[in-house]
Image (cartoon, helix red, strand yellow):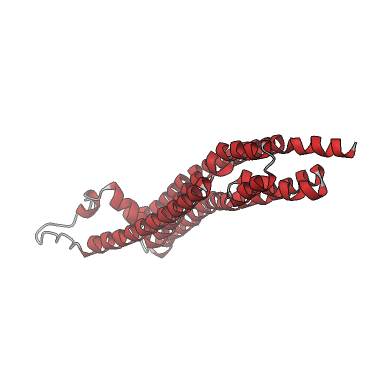
Amino acid sequence: MRQFVHNRISDELVRRVAMVLVILFLFAVAGLGTYATVVRAQPAEPAPAAAAPDSTATPSPAASENYLTWSIRSLGWTYSLAFLFISFNLIALVAMMILALRRENICPGDLADEFTAHLDQQQVQTAYDLARNDESFLGQVLAAGLVKVSGEGYDEAIKAMHEVGEAEVMKLEHRLSYIALIGKISPMVGLLGTVHGMVMAFQVIATSNSTPEPAKLADGIATALMTTLVGLMIAIPAVSVHDMFRNRITRLVMEVGSRSEELMVRFRTRNGSAKS
């Protein structure tokens, strides 16, 4: 019962984390839109009427533009929203995997102790109910083993435990695969922005009747470089976290396998003595 309540709390925490991330994403989109509107609404400083035009002078808006403004302008609306969406999904997936891969959700020690105590007292049905009502990895594996061991023997119980274990591992890896997908998609979006930015730069050269202005060429090059940078900044943590989670899943699954066989080994002795 304690484990069931704990799992309910964990599920509620996952939903709250997802809700907070969605709200933050909406605020980020709204803030980006407001920021872009304010930047566009700023009037340009009028040039002095008596002053002769100087081709070497740097425009004042570009000179006062900070790095954040330049980054958002270089990315543009399309790539900014795309990278925001990808990054918030990555954060949500990482938070859910951290909650799902806690030891008490995979191989709780309290469950193993209570399960052993019931078996020591010959309360097999109580041990089965305890494992079946527990939503942890170990609980599902033990419940599958007890179903088979009484009627079909120890070997069939181990086989059933392996099948349930593979199903539980598939559930964990299914969510983990989305993190790997983000690690692959993010640099592809950055590469798309690179190509797009270079096309913009060459378009300026192709459509210019004279030597193109460096500032106009810099817009396309900035888009190319900034999208590549942001794409890699998302992909590198995603790939790193994916590998760390995969290693943790492997370690916990091995622990569940050894722990479950250790708890069920007494039935092999009973079956062997019964056959003899």
Give the quarter of the figure containing the C terminus. top right
Q: Is residue 116 visible?
A: yes
Residue 204 falls in image quadrant:
bottom left
Q: What residue is shown at x 14% (from left), y 59% (from top)?
A: 47
Query: Which one is in front, 253 or 110?
Result: 110
Residue 259 falls in image quadrant:
top right
Left or right of residue 82: residue 265: right
* Residue at the extreme left: 50
Report x, y in % for residue 246. Answer: 59, 41
Q: What residue is shown at x 70% (from left), y 34% (from top)?
A: 262
Tell me: residue 187, above or below residue 82.
above
Left or right of residue 81: residue 135: right
Left or right of residue 24: residue 151: right
Q: What residue is shown at x 65% (from left), y 45% (from top)?
A: 127
Report x, y in % for residue 44. Answer: 18, 61
Tell me: residue 140, above or below residue 114.
below
